[in-house]
Amino acid sequence: MKKGFILLVIFLLVGCESILTNAPNANDAKNKDGQEANADSATRSDNHSDENDSNIETQTIHVTAEQVTRGNLVLVNKEHPLDEGAVPTDIVKLFQEQDLMNGYVLLDNTIRLSRSVALQFREMVEAAGEDGVHHFMISSGYRDTEEQEVLYREKGSDYALPPGYSEHNLGLSMDIGSTQMSIDQAPEGKWLQKHAWEFGFILRYPPDKTEITGIQYEPWHFRYVGLPHSMIMNDLGLTLEEYLDYLKNSSSYKTTVEGKKYEITYVPVTTKDIALEIPVGSEYEVSGNNIDGVIVTVNLSQDDGE
Ligand SMILES: [Zn+2]
């Protein structure tokens, strides 16, 4: 099976031996608009040969040990507390940001969230509105460690996690309600279960994965991970824990979303600074897993001149 481009380079650079070879088939590729053209582009990407890959002009990017704890894919749970520096710098009080407050209400005026995540949320509720689903409410967003401490002390360990171990401390998660009824009964909840991935969000604690997440089913708790990751997790039915494991045990994963081709590769970070080669001019994103490495997501669309 063809190995991914980044993978080849990593082998050259760090002589990594820990990557297995169950890369998923390019037929998994899918586009949220369901356009036929995507099947074509997936096939084209299949036809690239390793020989061609090695002829691609590359640029060097550097990954530092600090990046293991930063980014949209960091895992925060009972085993993996967040690093203090992991909180995005764009946390805002939503009620003060009128441009973000369209199509939903807040439980109270203290609710904070990463501004860029709130923009995605706004886009999502606007799309829901076009489907006739209108009654969204955010009941909780970012909590700093002091707020989490108070919650933990007052509510106890059955209800809350200790400071640093809750995704709410990260700024990328929120509890979403309906103003009409409980979210598991509401059209808002049903719409989110179906469409949240299209906007980069995942239902973080699904009912059939409580043993893996360690958290009971929470139909209200959504986490931003971004595309294409939310699409892959939705397609394969993976929690964040499982997805990060899956990437670690795969060679690179290729997929197409919204006409863009992505290659996603787990890279172990064993030294302070790692140099990686990616196709020159490619858009890319690096996120830590908050365990032992980073996930490098490269947009390969430029390859085909698309
Ligand atoms: Zn929550």
Image (cartoon, rainbow, N blue to C red):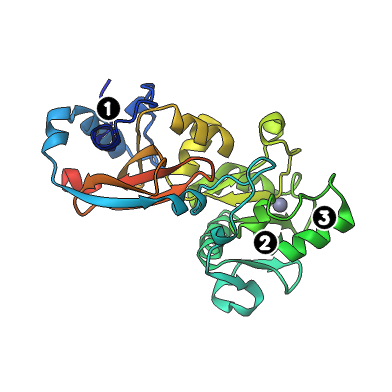
Quick check: 224 above or below 28?
A: below
Displayed quadrant of residue 277: top left
Percent of width and height locating residue 176: 69, 55
Q: Which mark is residue 141?
A: 2
Q: Secondary structure at mark 3?
A: helix
What residue is pinned by disc 3? Answer: 152
Displayed quadrant of residue 113: bottom right
Percent of width and height locating residue 111: 70, 68
Quick check: 125 above or below 303?
A: below
Q: Secondary structure at mark 1?
A: loop
User: Which residue is depicted at the point 45% across and 32% down?
Assistant: 248
Q: CA distance from mark 1 to mark 2?
A: 40 Å
Left or right, 157 with reference to 146:
right
Disc 3 marks which amino acid?
A: Tyr
Quick check: 48 above or below 264?
A: above
Disc 2 marks which amino acid?
A: Gly
Percent of width and height locating residue 210: 71, 32
| The residue positioned farthest toward the front in the image shown | 271
Mark closer to the chain start, 1 or 2: 1
Mark closer to the chain start, 3 or 1: 1
Left or right, 113 with reference to 280:
right
Are discs 1 and 2 less than 8 Å apart at CB?
Answer: no
Q: Is residue 65 visible?
A: yes
Percent of width and height locating residue 52: 12, 33
Q: In this view of the protein, which residue sits in the foreground, 179 or 168?
A: 168
Q: Residues within 10 Å of mark 1 (few under 14, many from 20)?
A: some
Displayed quadrant of residue 149: bottom right
What residue is pinned by disc 1? Answer: 3
- Indicate which label's residue lies in the foreground, 1 or 2: 1
Q: Residues within 10 Å of mark 3 (few under 14, many from 20)?
A: some
